[in-house]
Image (cartoon, coloured by chain):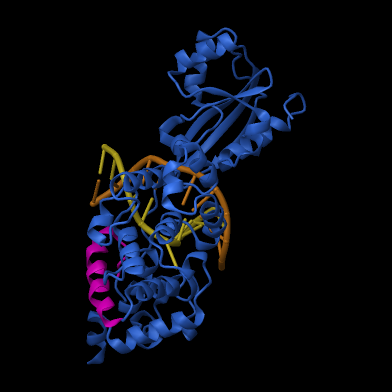
Chain colours: A blue, B orange, C yellow
Amino acid sequence: MKNTKVTSTFNNDEAEALISWFEASKRSMPWRTTRSPYWIWLSEIMSQQTQISTVIPYFLRFIDTFPNIQSLAKASQDQVFELWAGLGYYRRARLLHECAQLLCENLQGRFPSTRKELLSLPGIGRYTSAAIASIAFNEFVGVVDGNVKRVLSRVLAKDLGQNEHEAWVQAWMDRSIQASDSPGDFNEAFMELGARVCTPKSPSCSICPLQKICSAHHRGQTNEFPTPRRRAKVRELRLVALVLENNGDLLISREAPSSLFAGVAHVPLVEQHTYSRLSKELKWLSPVHKNEKAMEHELSHRRLHVEVHCQKILETEIRELCTHLDDSTLELTSYERFQRKPKTTLFKKVWHLASTSSKSKTP
DNA sequence: AATACGGGGAT
DNA sequence: ATCCCAGTATT
C-alpha cells in the first residue's frame, strides 16, 4: 500500500532524506557560494549539455572578465566568443550576450524573478528558467534535466526518457517540490544525485538516499531504466580549411557551412564541392591535390573530413574570394594576435596541422 | 515531433 | 567504441 503512495509524489520524509544527503555530500562549485541571478544564470547556460567539471574553468575565467551583467553587455561579441571557445554549442554564447544586452537596455540589468518571464529570454528554455527561478528566486518549480529523468525513471520503474514524458515529469517535480523547504536545494539535490549516485552506468544504490523507495532497485532493474533514447544519425561532411596567408597575416572568417560554430572566428571552411568550383573560377587557387594534409573531426552529429590547404594570397585575390564565397566576414589578422586566442577544437587541430607541415613556413 | 548544434568525461 | 552530459531553437 505504501508503494503506490510514494510514486505519486514525494512526501516530507523523502524530500528531507534527499536534501540531507545533498547537504552532506554536494560538490563544491564556484556558483554555489551565491544566489546571484547573474552567476546562477551564467552557470546554468554553460552547464547545458556540458559536465560540471568542464564548465568550472570557463565559468571562472568568464566571471573574472565580466564580473557583472553590465560588463558582459558592453563587451564585443568577439570577446564573449573568445571566452567561450572550446566549450561548444556556440549559439549559447551569442544568446547569452543578447540576453545581457536586452536586460541592460530594458530592465536596468535586472533579471525577472519568475519562471514564466525568464522563459521568454533568449537562450533560456524550460530547464534553465526553472533552475534560475528556484535557485535564485526561491520559486517552487521543478527542473527537468537528464539527471531528473533518469533518477525518476528508476524510482518509479517507468520509462520517462522520451520527449512525450517531459510534461509528466515536470508535473511530478512541481508537485514533489512542495514537500521541500528550499526549492533550489531540492532541484540541485535531485540533479546531484543523478550525477553522483544514480549514474547512467553502475549506479551506487548502496549509498542512495532514495534506495528504500526505488522500484527499479527493488526489482533489480536499475539497468533497464530509462530506456535509451534513439541517437541522432551522424552525417558526413567533407570540408576544405583554407589557411591563407598575406604578408604574415592570416585570413579568417566567421561563416561556416551548416551554421557550424555560430560565428566564432575560424579560417575559412568550405565544403569540398564549393572548393572545386572555386578552384576553377579562381586561377590563382590551386586545386586540392592527393597529398593535401587531411584530418578528421568528430561532432556528436557530424563526422568532418577536413583537407587543410595552405597558400599565400594577394590582397586583390582576397577581394575576389569574398565575392565568390559571398562571405563578407573575411578579414586579415596577425598571426601573433590570433595564435594566442582561444579557439574551437576543430580550429586547434587545423592550426596544428598547418603549422607542423614539413614544407610550410607558418610557425 | 524531429533535428541541428561541440566537445569531452566516463566506462 | 559508446553513451551522455544541470538543453534550446528551429524545422
Image: magenta residue range: A159-180
Q: Position of residue A91 (x, y in %)?
A: 41, 43
In the foreground, A258 or A327: A327
> Can residue A226 be seen in this snapshot?
no
Q: Quadrant of residue A7?
A: bottom left
In the foreground, A198 or A61: A61
Q: Position of residue A51 (x, y in %)?
A: 50, 60
Q: Is residue A322 left or right of residue A224?
A: right
In the foreground, A187 or A73: A73
Q: Quadrant of the N terminus of chain A?
A: bottom left
> Can residue A34 be seen in this snapshot?
yes
Q: Position of residue A216 (x, y in %)?
A: 36, 79
The residue at 55%/41% (across/down) is A344
Q: Position of residue A252 (x, y in %)?
A: 55, 27
Furthest-front residue in this view: A108
- In the picture shown, does residue A34 fall above or below B7? below
Decide whether residue A177 is among the magenta residues: yes
In the foreground, A349 or A128: A128
The residue at 53%/71% (across/down) is A28
The residue at 39%/52% (across/down) is A231
Furthest-bottom residue in this view: A1
Specify the principal SS of the magenta part.
Answer: helix
Furthest-right residue in this view: A358
- In the picture shown, does residue A136 fall above or below A242? below
- In the picture shown, does residue A15 fall above or below A149? below
Q: Is residue A354 left or right of residue A189?
A: right
